[in-house]
Amino acid sequence: PEARTLVLVKPDAVRRGLVGEVLRRIEAKGYTLVAAELRTADPALLEEHYAEHAGKPFFEPLVTFMSSGPVLAAVVAGERVVEGFRSLAGATDPTSAAPGTIRGDLGRDWGRPVTENLVHGSDSDESAAREISLWFPGL
Ligand code: CMP
């Protein structure tokens, strides 16, 4: 069966008008959009979403940043899409992310935390199932 992943186009990317560019890359790769919604997330949802990072120094700035404006939350499907989207996204730090990736082509260090890296993708099938049920209950 096809895998699914949760993609978030983060507030920095939405503010820069990159939603279409990110979706274009996902669709050009041949993945299928199953659901998508633009919304400003509650800190409570983000604290659950990022529960594994609770206590890390970047946790609070991350939740503040992620709730600072709308995100495009999307469920994307396709064979091995979890690792496939992470490959499209590139390394966490946009300065060192490879050219050809979303973060490598479109991201950079703006003198703000590396937290601002344009997109999120689930890191495993288990995370994807958990995150999809959080953002799209019932899907
Ligand atoms: P994401 O894929 O959404 O998962 C966790 C997020 O935490 C990550 O992308 C970054 O936005 C952020 N992050 C990870 N590592 C760091 C770090 N060292 N400093 C600041 N933010 C980080």
Image: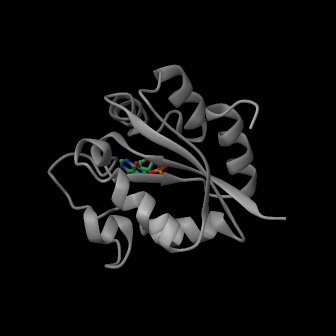
Say if residue 67 shows up in the picture: yes
The part of the image, by quadrant, that contains residue 92 is bottom left
Task: Residue at 68%, 50% (x, y): give it.
Answer: 128
Res. 95 in view: no
At x 72% / y 71%, what residue is drawn?
Answer: 79
Vertical arrangement, residue 58 with respect to residue 81, above or below: above
Q: Residue at x 76, y 31 (%)?
A: 138
Relative to 137, say whether 100 is above or below: below
Where is residue 104? Give x, y as percent.
31, 71
The residue at the far bottom in this view is: 99
The C terminus sits in image quarter: top right
Q: Quadrant of residue 83?
A: bottom right
Q: How far across and down, in percent of the image, does residue 52 sit?
A: 60, 41
Q: Quadrant of the N terminus?
A: bottom right
Would residue 87 be found to the left or right of residue 64 on screen?
Answer: right
Location of residue 14 by image quarter: top left
Give how far across and how far down residue 81 sits, in percent: 65, 66
